[in-house]
Structures are given as structure tokens and as C-alpha cells.
Amino acid sequence: MDHDLLEHIEIETGENPTSSIIWLHGLGADGHDFEPIVPELNLPDSLRIRFIFPHAPRRLINGEQEMRAWYDFVPHSENSGGDDIQISQKQINAFIERELDRGIFSNKILLAGFSQGGVIALHTALRFKQRLAGVLALSTYLHDTNQVESERDDANLALPIMMAHGTQDPVIPIVRAATSRENLIRLGYDVSWFDYPMGHQVCLEEIEEVSRFFQTLL
């Protein structure tokens, strides 16, 4: 199975991990992007977590530039990225399945993602057929709400989701994220929301909040 997995980085915070966090980077970055965040989370030693940071495949974006991306997209289009998103979903499902094979319970597996990575984390978790721990969705949005309504799986109803966004985000306007939040709440998910005076990035206060979220769920 492993040879089918995307290239990735793994960091374990203790021996014999009991939980896993699969963390997806944003457009043009790679798995190393969020690697430095692990020590900054200051997680207690008792939480033995395996962090997995996959590298997205290289794709041609807007027919112009090749870069690592979870999907191709049309700027400012609500629902672009369709087929690529399904492919990325299957690739992340493969990571979840491997963690299950390694003896991690599904409700101890958390998906995290920034920007495009957050889109895939949400898309994958809401459709997964076993209960997951939750989703961390940073500077991101929900892809195609109507589709979520018809395709979501009951196993992850009322799933805890933490959303955080910059009030001055020029890439994904905060209004788009707030609309996603309202749609997720309407669909019955347990959404906690944080916003910060920043752009399309991550800040220290946010990392502290993320740490609390992980500790609560895992």
C-alpha cells in the first residue's frame, strides 16, 4: 500500500503514537511548510501524535504555471477544482486507511489543512465512512455546499471543526470563509471560529488555539 502514497514527511511526538494528524499545505508550498509548527504547538508529552505532512502533486495551474497543488482552480470561482478535488480526496483517504492499518482508531485521526489543503481536509473528512476526530481548517473555505449535503457521511455528523481566518486575507476573502462556516453550522457541524488581524498566513495566537483544539480532541 505504502508505495501508492504521496511523498510525505512524518514526525512522531512520542513512541507508539496513539493518534495521527494529517496536515495539508497550501498552493505552491509542500509538506515542509507546516513542519516547524510541531514544536510551537507545545503539546504535552502524554499526547503521542504522528504528524503526517503529504506533498501535493505538481499540477498546471490556470494553464500557466506548474506548482504543487491539491487542485487546479479558476480564481474567484465558487466550485472550480472538481475532478482534482476527488483525486486528492482519494489520496488523503489512502493516508487515513494506512493509519487505521497501523492501529490508530479512526476517532483519533484528525485532518488539518491551510488554504487549498483546508478545502481537501474538509471535503475528505465530511465524506469519510468512519468517525474522525475533527478538522482544522485554516484560511480556507468549503467546496460546493450542495454537494456536501448530498455526499456527506452520517459517520461524521456534528464533527468538531475549527476554522481560523485573517480579516485582511487577500487570497480567500474572510466573507467566503464566514459563509462556509454558516453552511457548516446549518448542516449540523460543531464549528468553532477564530479570526485574526492578518493576511493569508498563520499567527502565534492562532497556533495556541490550534494546540488547545488538538488537546481537546485527542
Image (tube, rainbow, N blue to C red):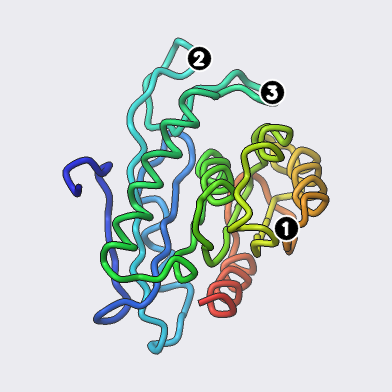
Q: Residue at x 64, y 69 (%)?
A: 205
Q: Is residue 83 left or right of residue 140?
A: left
Specify which label sits upstream in the sequence, 3 or 2.
2
Q: Quadrant of residue 88?
A: top left
Q: Name the element at disc 2.
A: loop
Work out whether residue 8 or residue 183 is closer to the camera in this orientation and state it: 183
- The image position of residue 130, as x and y in percent, is 49, 59
The relative height of residue 123 versus residue 113 in the rendered view (above or below) is above
- The image position of residue 192, as x and y in percent, is 73, 64
Q: Which mark is residue 158?
A: none
Which residue corresponds to mark 1? 189
- The image position of residue 26, as x and y in percent, is 48, 41
How far apart are the alpha carbons under marks 1 and 2?
33 Å
Number of marks in picture: 3
How far apart are the alpha carbons under marks 3 and 1?
25 Å
How would you rate the neighbour count of disc 1 (Cα within 10 Å): few for under 14, some for 14-19, many for 20 or more?
Answer: some
Which residue corresponds to mark 2? 62
Q: Which mark is residue 76?
A: 3
What amino acid is labelled 1 in the image? Tyr
How far apart are the alpha carbons under marks 3 and 2?
12 Å
Give the number of the mark in front: 1 or 2.
1
Q: Quadrant of residue 29?
A: top left
What amino acid is labelled 3 in the image? His
Q: Is residue 69 left or right of residue 94?
A: right
Q: Residue at x 70, y 61 (%)?
A: 158
- The image position of residue 151, as x and y in percent, is 62, 38
Work out whether residue 31 or residue 150 is closer to the camera in this orientation and state it: 150
Q: Residue at x 60, y 61 (%)?
A: 203
What amino acid is labelled 2 in the image? Asn
